[in-house]
Amino acid sequence: MFSLCYLPTAGRMTLTVIKCRNLKAMDITGSSDPYVKVSLICDGRRLKKRKTTTKRSTLNPVYNEAIIFDIPPENVEQVSLSITVMDYDRVGHNEVIGVCYTGPDAQGLGRDHWTEMLAYPRKPITHWHSLGEWPGRAASFESQGSCPSPKPPLTP
């Protein structure tokens, strides 16, 4: 669950990560050490990223943490946000639990949440979002309209 609030006069967007529930257990202990990573994306490039604190050994973390991005009003229709819930691992790589997107080119609730935020400036708009598979591991990545696959090099 997160809220979005846009202040057009200040060119400031606040995403408040409120909480998660029923996350997938990623550790041997049957739990996870989740944190949320938010990336500001423009034309497929990550411009900025921020993250919350890590909540230890829980599948239902509560954050209530605000993440602020400066986005001028003339650019608000060209950017989107990637919200990734990660599992912190002391040893090895942190693992992706799930991801969702919000912005003008997002699908379903992701787009609706963004549109509602723009329609009601200065008012926090809160919604629950379902986490999807991480694109790097999703079998249907090609069908999601994301970046095209790299072409193999031409051999002379």
Image (cartoon, grey):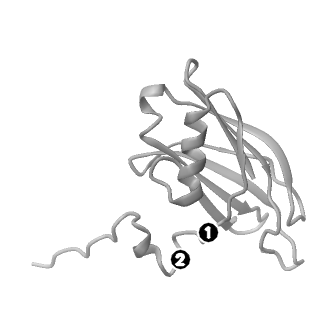
Report crowding for label 1: few under 14, some 14 to 19, many 20 or more residues within 10 A (C-alpha).
Answer: few
Q: Quadrant of residue 60?
A: bottom right
Residue 133: x %, y % from top left: 60, 72
Quote the CA–CA distance across marks 1 and 2. 9 Å
Q: Nearer the viewer, mark 1 or mark 2?
A: 1
Q: Are marks 1 and 2 in contact (CB under 8 Å)?
A: yes
Q: Check the image and report above or below for 118 versus 152.
A: above
Residue named by callout 1? 132
Q: Check the image and report above or below for 5 versus 7.
A: below
Q: In the visual, does 109 lie left or right of 3? A: left
N-term-proximal mark, 1 vs 2: 1
Label 2 residue SS: loop
Label 1 residue SS: loop
Task: Say which of 64 and 39 sits in front.
Answer: 64
Residue 156: x %, y % from top left: 9, 78
Q: Check the image and report above or below for 63 versus 91.
A: above
Residue named by callout 2? 138
